[in-house]
Image (cartoon, rainbow, N blue to C red):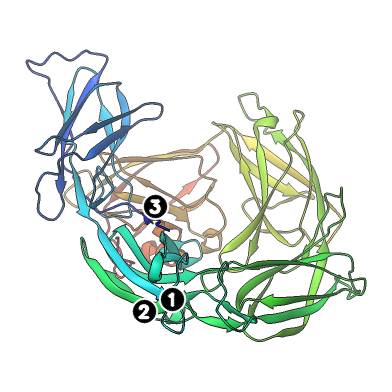
């Protein structure tokens, strides 16, 4: 069975200078523009013929191909802001303005009656990873799921993430194509194939060169356009295990007639899932469990009820041997009732029904459980039953509005993780305002020249808030003239910094923010306030994950 190999990260490219030039003798309508450029090989500078070039705007897109000299032209373009990308066989897709593979490209301003030239894209040659997955006797295994795993930034720090996918074919052969330069782990897993012989055996997630945990895996180093061979390793087998325990409430009394859901989590699992009932004495037992890490939840199966019993503190376990005498303490769901209200100082009418509310509960180090509230009523009322415990409230609000305050039982808990407790009812009030903050500025180098496509990061002075809200931690890119802006930041004491480039999502990592802190500019932002800030480019911190 022939399958696929796919990459989800962009390739390295160097942006050429962008300029809009007079049309001269060429007649271009005043209500449209023309975009020209070239696509070349990033290593040799040679033109890439027949490359696909895409110009994407908010509501329109154009696609053309390059000629034998790598040149292209897109005519009759509506004036506005666009992004440009290019792709070709044997290369990794790239965007105009990228200086490394993990950053966004630059925008292009197209003016009516003008020729915008120099929109050049450099394509990085793609790499290939070849190998075979075998059983413990050395025989090839077909239809095994294969992944390339790379370290990536997240709000929880640097974590390994699957970035490319394939499936083994006959004799266990697999191949990843269109792979960026970088360091990778190779992961294999399947739940559809059983090892031959002993019925009590299963295959577990395995990593090159033949280990069951990503922490002990060997990296595969791949350069631009390189082909890695011989990535051969066994899919490890293990004996299934048993998990048994009891479910009780917060007082220690047995909770019967419920269900326990056990879900594989993380790269070291096969993503298996088990669901079993709990008897009247609160006992449960799960057999034939594949070894690995799991998350356990307790749910109430009563038909027609919206309530649910969840673990008051999310429980993670690692199954290597039989797990017995496991105690799960379940808590009743919490009924949250309240309303969406308009700030009295707002200047526009508000439609509460356009607001969406989500209750997010963190699960383990990197996961979360999100429960969306039913549609908010026109009068602003909402009512939902959700798991208890520590929860973060997120909102999606109409344009030109932002959250001013979230009050739970009268206490202001805006942008904080809230302990909803165990059972009972809580009253919530979410206040929206149209008095938005606005921060604009300019990033320049030490000589005062504007920094185009620089990474501008803003974050609170208080590190306790770094993980909790995108309302207070943001990243944007400066324009061609070095200009940048942030709209609707929550009022707070802030730090803001401009650096040449950061790897994708590095600004979410608290450790990266901590390293940016000494070179950042401090400012205070109050409700509805507008600020203008000039920034001098600071060096990108050393030792970050390579930008491939």
Marks 2 and 1 sit apart, C-alpha to C-alpha, by 8 Å
Which residue is disc 3 drawn over?
A: 457
Marks 2 and 3 sit apart, C-alpha to C-alpha, by 34 Å
Say which of 217 and 331 sits in front: 217
Identify the element where label 1 is drawn.
strand
Residue 340 in view here = yes
Q: Residues within 10 Å of mark 1 (few under 14, many from 20)?
A: many
Q: Nearer the viewer, mark 3 or mark 1?
A: 1
Judge from the rendering whether residue 176 lies leftward or rightward of residue 401; answer left or right. Answer: left
Q: Residue 376 in the image: x percent, y percent? A: 73, 35
Reply above or below: 174 against 45: below
Reply above or below: 386 against 215: above
Say which of 276 and 41 sits in front: 276
> Which of pointers 3 and 1 lies earlier in the amino acid sequence?
1
Judge from the rendering whether residue 383 lies leftward or rightward of residue 202; answer left or right. Answer: right
Reply above or below: 140 against 60: below
| Residue 245 lies in quadrant | bottom right
Judge from the rendering whether residue 527 lies leftward or rightward of residue 146; answer left or right. Answer: right
Which residue is disc 2 drawn over?
A: 218
Which residue is disc 1 drawn over?
A: 207
Judge from the rendering whether residue 145 lies leftward or rightward of residue 99; answer left or right. Answer: right
Q: Assign the N terminus to one quadrant of the image.
A: bottom left
> Which of pointers 2 and 1 lies earlier in the amino acid sequence?
1
Q: What residue appears at the point 29 percent right and 35 percent down from the top-left corner?
A: 54
Say which of 402 and 321 sits in front: 321
């Amino acid at each position: 069975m022939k399958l696929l190999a796919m990459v989800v990260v962009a390739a390295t490219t160097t942006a050429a200078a962008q300029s809009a030039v007079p049309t001269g003798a060429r007649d271009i309508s005043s209500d449209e523009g023309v975009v020209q450029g070239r696509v070349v090989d990033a290593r040799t500078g040679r033109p890439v013929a027949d490359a696909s070039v895409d110009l994407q705007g908010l509501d329109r897109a154009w696609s053309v191909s390059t000629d034998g000299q790598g040149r292209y032209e897109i005519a009759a373009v509506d004036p506005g802001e666009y992004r440009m990308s290019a792709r070709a066989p044997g290369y990794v897709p790239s965007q105009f303005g990228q200086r490394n593979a993990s950053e966004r490209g630059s925008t292009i301003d197209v003016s009516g009656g003008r020729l915008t030239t120099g929109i050049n894209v450099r394509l990085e040659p793609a790499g290939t990873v070849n190998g075979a997955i075998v059983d413990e006797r050395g025989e090839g295994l077909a239809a095994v799921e294969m992944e390339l795993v790379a370290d990536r930034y997240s709000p929880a720090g640097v974590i390994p993430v699957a970035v490319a996918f394939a499936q083994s074919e006959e004799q266990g052969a697999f191949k990843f194509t269109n792979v960026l330069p970088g360091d990778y782990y190779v992961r294999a897993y399947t739940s559809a194939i059983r090892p031959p012989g002993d019925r009590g055996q299963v295959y577990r997630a395995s990593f090159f060169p033949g280990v069951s945990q990503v922490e002990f895996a060997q990296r595969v180093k791949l350069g631009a356009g390189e082909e890695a061979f011989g990535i051969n390793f066994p899919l490890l087998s293990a004996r299934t295990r048993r998990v048994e325990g009891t479910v009780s409430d917060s007082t220690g009394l047995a909770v019967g007639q419920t269900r326990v859901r056990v879900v594989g989590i993380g790269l070291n699992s096969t993503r298996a899932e088990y669901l079993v009932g709990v008897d009247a004495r609160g006992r449960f037992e799960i057999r034939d469990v594949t070894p690995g890490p799991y998350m356990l939840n307790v749910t109430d199966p009563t038909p027609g009820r919206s309530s649910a019993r969840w673990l008051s503190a999310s429980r993670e376990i690692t199954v290597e041997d039989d797990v017995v005498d496991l105690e799960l303490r379940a808590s009743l769901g919490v009924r949250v009732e309240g309303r969406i209200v308009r700030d009295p100082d707002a200047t526009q009418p508000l439609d509460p029904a356009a607001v969406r509310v989500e209750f997010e509960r963190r699960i383990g180090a990197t996961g979360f459980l999100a429960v969306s509230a039913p549609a908010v009523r026109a009068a602003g009322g909402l009512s939902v039953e959700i798991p208890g415990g520590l929860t973060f409230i997120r909102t999606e609000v109409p344009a030109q509005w932002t959250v001013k305050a979230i009050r739970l039982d009268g206490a202001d808990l805006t942008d904080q993780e809230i302990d909803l407790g165990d059972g009972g009812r809580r009253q919530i009030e979410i206040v929206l305002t149209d008095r938005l903050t606005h921060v604009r500025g300019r990033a320049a180098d030490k000589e005062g020249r504007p920094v185009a496509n620089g990474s501008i990061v803003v974050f609170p002075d208080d590190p306790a808030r770094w993980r909790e809200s995108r309302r207070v931690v943001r990243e944007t890119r400066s324009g061609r003239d070095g200009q940048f802006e942030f709209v609707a930041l929550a009022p707070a004491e802030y730090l803001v910094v401009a650096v040449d480039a950061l790897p994708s999502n590095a600004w979410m990592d608290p450790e990266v923010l901590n390293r940016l802190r000494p070179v950042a500019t401090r400012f205070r932002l109050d409700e509805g306030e507008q600020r203008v800030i000039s920034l001098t480019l600071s060096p990108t911190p050393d030792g970050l994950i390579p930008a491939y």
